[in-house]
Image: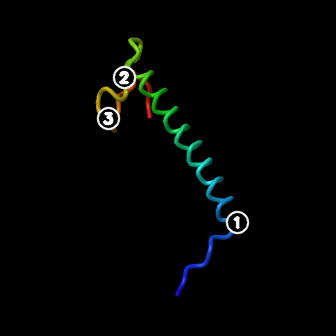
């Protein structure tokens, strides 16, 4: 059984899909670069609530429940 020739709409969609894929890849790259830049900056500090460990509650001073 012979393969049918590709319809014109498939070539149009392929071009759009490649364009959307490139834009998505550029967005992911931009987010990665911004994150890397922020983490490597000298002013970056881990917040105290996360520095103690994941899920650790830091008790507040005073106050009642």
Residue occupying image coordinates x 52% and y 42%: 25
Q: Residue 46 — which label? A: 2
Answer few, some or many: residues within 10 Å of disc 2's Cα (few below 14, many 20 plus, some between 14 and 19). few
- Asked whether the beta carbons under mark 3 and mark 2 sit within 8 Å of each other, the answer is no
Instruction: Kindly state the secondary structure of the residue where label 1 is placed.
Output: helix
Mark with earlier residue (1, 3): 1
Closest to the observer, 1 or 33: 1
Q: CA distance from mark 1 to mark 3?
A: 59 Å
Q: CA distance from mark 3 to mark 2?
A: 14 Å
Mark with earlier residue (2, 1): 1
Q: Residue 56 — which label? A: 3
Instruction: Kindly state the secondary structure of the residue where label 2 is placed.
Output: loop
Answer few, some or many: residues within 10 Å of disc 1's Cα (few below 14, many 20 plus, some between 14 and 19). few
Q: Residue 54 — which label? A: none
Q: Nearer the viewer, mark 1 or mark 3?
A: 1
Q: Position of residue 47 (x, y in %)?
A: 39, 23
Quadrant in the picture for residue 3: bottom right
Q: Which residue is mark 1?
A: 8
């Amino acid at each position: 059984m012979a393969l049918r020739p590709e319809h014109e709409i498939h070539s149009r969609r392929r071009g759009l899909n490649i364009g959307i894929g490139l834009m998505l890849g550029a967005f992911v790259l931009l987010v990665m670069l911004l994150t890397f830049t922020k983490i490597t900056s000298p002013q970056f500090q881990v917040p105290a609530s996360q520095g103690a460990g994941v899920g650790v509650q830091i008790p507040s001073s005073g106050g009642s429940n």
